[in-house]
């Protein structure tokens, strides 16, 4: 997450820095050119003011041509001025040293009109084909105001050469671009430092939450083991079988983690079963079996506040549903049953059948596998059964169980390993799902105690 943030934010920062630098450079350039235009206006006005009187601007062009020629011709070449044209308020040319003919008139519009309104106006001259005019040029429209009239009576149209100003403008442009980009990068480094510090704090908090979650899983598993020693060993064997099945089926990582937590905690609800039922020697009565059947619901309720995905909790609730819909507690059928519950159901049934119970002797592994195969499509998911059978066929000794017994230390080691793996993937809780309402299902004639 931090790496992605670093790359994306750095790219965006550089792009924004370039954009803001370009904007700042344009603003600085515009300011410099505006100051240059104002300097030209002041220079021309102060130069011409002592030599031209108000009536010169109000008289016909033929009558004042000599006066304007004498006054303004000497401006050409000074202060980088290239051309000068004078327009009166009627749009008539009073003077021009260029191609514009004196005495001609045209509708007053554009920058000339703005200058006659009293606004100093400037713009770049379009590129010229003249080799001598290869540099950048600027034309400035200077309002001419005389004391006898508050409105400008004429406009000085001055074209100036910016060749001497260009290096300064280039330096200003690149200085503004570099300064803005550098400033944005400094701001980015400051923000990145803050984000990295916050990210490390968040990682520490996630580590603490993950550690707490592992403690919850281990505590629940140990509580089940302390409540019923058989259940503790049984959980271990079921978990090992489930790990083999899910890898054989090629399930994705999230399903793998979910199956592991369901296999480890599918019998956690037995904590709420009374001792006289849980530890009874002999077969359970229908009433006792009805109480025993509620352990999957109790497990779901016990795990309700635990920060694991709702799908894992529902899989524990439905870990005794049958493929044909006659299981408990909700009578789900087929693909309505969570895949984790279907995997655990097969491994749980197999381990129950090869274990000694107070009301029957353990089956042989071969007989138990035959029962599993017979129940495919009715009690068990056929695909899960096929994966389980492929695993058992690869076992040495003609389908022997994976292990016949385990020490309590091995159980604790497996619980710690799986809880750590689950915590790494389930460190954040998923949104709560919707509970299924329990449905009445017929009692099995000879239900095994698993």
Image (tube, rainbow, N blue to C red):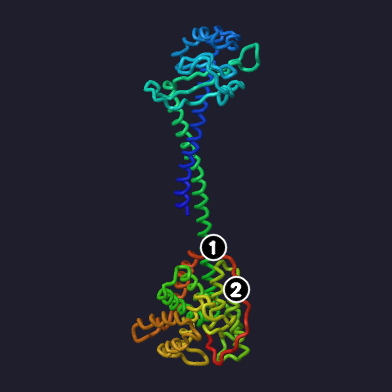
* Place of residue 100 in the rendered image (x, y in percent of width and height, measured from the top left): 48, 18
Q: Could you tell me if residue 87 is visible in this image?
A: yes
What is the number of the mark on residue 104?
none
The answer for how far apart the CA atoms under marks 1 and 2 are is: 18 Å
Q: Residue at x 47, y 25 (%)?
A: 125
Q: Tag 1, which secondary structure?
A: loop
Marks 1 and 2 close (CB-CB < 8 Å): no
Q: Closer to the camera, 268 or 405?
A: 268
What is the number of the mark on residue 302?
2
Give the image quarter of residue 332.
bottom right
Q: Residue at x 42, y 89 (%)?
A: 370
* Place of residue 160 in the rendered image (x, y in percent of width and height, measured from the top left): 46, 19
* Place of residue 194 in the rendered image (x, y in percent of width and height, measured from the top left): 52, 46
Q: Residue at x 53, y 79 (%)?
A: 319
Toward the left, the furthest residue is 396
- Count the labels in the image: 2
Q: Which residue is mark 1?
A: 428
């Amino acid at each position: 997450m931090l790496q992605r943030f670093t790359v994306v934010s750095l790219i965006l920062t550089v792009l924004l820095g370039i954009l803001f630098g370009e904007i700042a450079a344009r603003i600085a350039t515009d300011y410099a050119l505006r100051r240059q235009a104002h300097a030209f206006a002041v220079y021309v006005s102060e130069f011409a003011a002592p030599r031209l009187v108000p009536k010169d601007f109000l008289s016909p062009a033929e009558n004042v041509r000599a006066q304007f020629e004498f006054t303004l011709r000497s401006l050409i070449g000074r202060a980088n001025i290239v051309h000068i044209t004078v327009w009166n308020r009627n749009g008539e040319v009073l003077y021009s040293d260029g191609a514009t003919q004196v005495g001609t008139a045209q509708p007053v519009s554009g920058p000339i009109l703005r200058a006659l309104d009293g606004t100093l106006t400037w713009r770049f001259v379009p590129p010229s084909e003249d080799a001598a005019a290869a540099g950048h040029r600027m034309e400035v429209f200077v309002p001419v105001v005389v004391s006898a009239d508050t409105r400008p009576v004429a406009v000085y149209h001055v074209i100036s050469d910016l060749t001497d100003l260009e290096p300064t403008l280039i330096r200003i442009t690149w200085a503004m671009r570099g300064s803005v980009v550098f400033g944005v990068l400094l701001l980015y480094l400051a923000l990145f430092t803050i984000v990295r510090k916050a990210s490390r704090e968040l990682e520490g908090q996630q580590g603490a939450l993950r550690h707490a979650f592992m403690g919850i899983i281990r505590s629940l598993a140990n509580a089940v083991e302390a409540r019923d020693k058989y259940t503790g060993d049984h959980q271990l064997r079921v978990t090992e079988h489930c790990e083999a099945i899910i890898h054989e089926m090629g399930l994705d990582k999230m399903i793998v983690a979910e199956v592991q937590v369901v296999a480890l905690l599918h019998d956690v609800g037995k904590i709420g079963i009374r001792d006289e039922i849980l530890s009874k020697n002999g077969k359970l009565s229908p009433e006792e079996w009805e109480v025993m059947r509620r352990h999957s619901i109790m497990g779901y309720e016990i795990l309700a506040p635990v920060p694991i995905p709702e799908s894992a909790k529902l899989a524990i609730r439905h870990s005794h549903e049958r493929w044909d819909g006659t299981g408990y507690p909700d009578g789900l059928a087929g693909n309505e049953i969570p895949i984790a519950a279907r995997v655990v159901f097969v491994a749980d049934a197999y381990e129950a059948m090869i274990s000694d119970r107070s009301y029957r002797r353990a089956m042989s592994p071969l007989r138990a596998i035959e029962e599993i195969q017979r129940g495919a499509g009715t009690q068990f998911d056929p695909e899960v059964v096929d994966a389980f059978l492929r695993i058992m066929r690869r076992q040495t000794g003609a389908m022997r169980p994976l292990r016949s017994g385990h020490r309590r230390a091995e159980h604790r080691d497996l619980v710690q390993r799986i809880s750590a793996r689950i915590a790494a993937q389930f460190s954040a809780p998923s949104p709560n799902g919707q509970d299924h309402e329990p449905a009445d299902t017929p009692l099995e004639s000879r239900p095994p105690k698993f």
